[in-house]
């Protein structure tokens, strides 16, 4: 059973590239949803099951930071991991995003392997290999 992934970016080209990277990287995909801004993303999250959100920061109407803040104010939405994928280079801004609740930050340009590793690190539940009870 694959992951339901929401890709949020105001650039359709960027969304397609992220989705293709997920496929090429071998991420186990259930459904992929797309949104052009944070407002559209929140509407999708309210109506569809989403395991993880991959989002840009700079978008019209509602940017990635505002989206994360809205998600954090909702009991159920705040449990959905958010990964920011952006060209942002400011370490201070990246740290503030992490304090705001994002799980990871991927800098553009990225590789399919970067995406897969990040998604797997966040969504894969470690198995208990200890023996006995």
Image (cartoon, grey):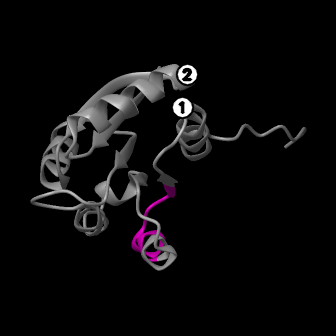
To which quarter of the image does residue 116 belong? top right
Left or right side of 29 for 125: right
CB within 8 Å, label 2 to label 1:
yes
Q: Residue at x 32, y 53 (%)?
A: 56
Residue nearer the viewer, 41 or 55: 55
24 vs 80, nearest the viewer: 24
Q: Residue at x 44, y 62 (%)?
A: 102
Which secondary structure, mark 1?
A: helix
Position above or below: 103 against 98? above
Q: Which of the two labelled residues, at mark 2 and mark 1, occupies the earlier sequence position?
A: 2
Q: Which residue is mark 1?
A: 112
* Residue 41 in the figure: left or right of residue 83: left
Q: Where residue 39 appears, x then y in whole percent?
A: 13, 54
Give x and y (percent) for residue 133. Answer: 84, 43
**Outermost residue, left side:** 61
Q: Position of residue 4 (x, y in %)?
A: 36, 31
Kindly tell me whether residue 76 is visible in this rendering.
no
Task: Provide the residue designation for mark 2.
Answer: 26
Q: Residues within 10 Å of mark 1 (few under 14, many from 20)?
A: some
Q: Secondary structure at mark 2?
A: loop
Q: Is residue 68 visible?
A: yes
| Range of residues picked out in magenta | 96-105
């Amino acid at each position: 059973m694959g992951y339901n992934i929401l890709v949020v970016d105001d650039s359709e080209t960027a969304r397609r590239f992220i989705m293709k990277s997920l496929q090429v990287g071998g991420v186990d995909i259930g459904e992929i949803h797309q949104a052009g801004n944070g407002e559209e993303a929140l509407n999708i999250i309210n109506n569809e099951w989403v395991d993880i959100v991959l989002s840009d920061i700079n978008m019209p109407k509602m940017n990635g930071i505002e989206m994360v803040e809205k998600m954090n104010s909702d009991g159920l939405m705040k449990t959905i991991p958010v990964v920011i994928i952006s060209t942002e280079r400011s370490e201070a801004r990246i740290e503030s995003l992490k304090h705001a609740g994002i799980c990871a930050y991927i800098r553009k340009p990225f590789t399919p392997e970067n995406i897969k590793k990040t998604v797997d690190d966040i969504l894969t539940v470690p198995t208990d290999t200890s023996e006995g009870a």
